[in-house]
Image (spheres, rainbow, N blue to C red):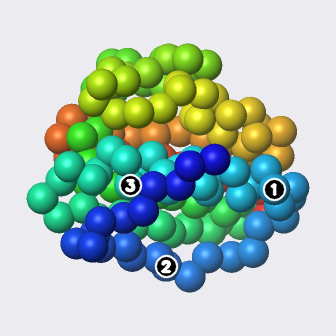
Amino acid sequence: MKFLRPTRYSVLNIQDLPVLRGDAKMLAHVWTNLLSNAIKYSRKSFRPEIEIGCNTSTFEHTFYVKDNGVGFEMQYYHKLFSVFQRLHTAEEFEGTGIGLALIYRIITKHDGRVWAESEVNKGATFYFSLPI
């Protein structure tokens, strides 16, 4: 899997994260896809910023990857985690359209949830939660 490198002007803020329990290779795939997407969709920003963090409640850890990239229109949210559904053209941003669908399947197999929030030209935040 191709992992995009942040530009030399990127800001990457990583909070302390708890240890995950589950299939290590599959969860690594989730992180790789989320981080690659954050880098890809924010690289055209004047000063790309990516934040990685976690909020913990009594029953679950909620991880997030936030960027200040192009974002997407929430009216198309229902397409986001479907196979081969892209919200941007291949000419704008490379990709196959399967990354978020795979993330969805991996997280639900771990009894978790996945969702996103976004605003066009203000970035996106992708979340996934896993039981403690």
Say which residue label 3 marks: 39
Which residue is located at x 18 percent, y 53 percent?
A: 45
Where does the C terminus fall, quadrant-wise?
bottom right
Label 3 and label 1: CA atoms lie apart by 21 Å
What element does badge 1 sit on? Answer: helix
Q: Is residue 86 left or right of residue 106?
A: left
Q: Amino acid at mark 3?
A: Ile
Instruction: Identify which residue, 76 or 7, lies in the foreground.
Output: 7
What element does badge 3 sit on? Answer: helix
Say which residue label 1 marks: 25
Which residue is located at x 37 percent, y 24 percent?
A: 90
Which residue is located at x 49 percent, y 79 percent?
A: 15
How far from the left and from the top, in percent, is residue 103?
66, 40
Front position among marks 1 and 2: 1
Say which residue label 2 marks: 15
How far from the left and from the top, in percent, is residue 51?
39, 67
Residue 104 visible, this angle: no
| Precedes in sequence: disc 1 or disc 2 | 2
Q: Amino acid at mark 1?
A: Lys
Q: Is residue 40 left or right of residue 81?
A: left
Please say if 2 is above or below 61: above
Label 1 and label 2: CA atoms lie apart by 22 Å
Instruction: Decide: few, some or many residues near mark 2? Use Cα within 10 Å; few <14, some 14-19, many ≥20.
Output: few
The label shown at residue 48 is none
Instruction: Decide: few, some or many residues near mark 3? Use Cα within 10 Å; few <14, some 14-19, many ≥20.
Output: many
Front position among marks 2 and 3: 3
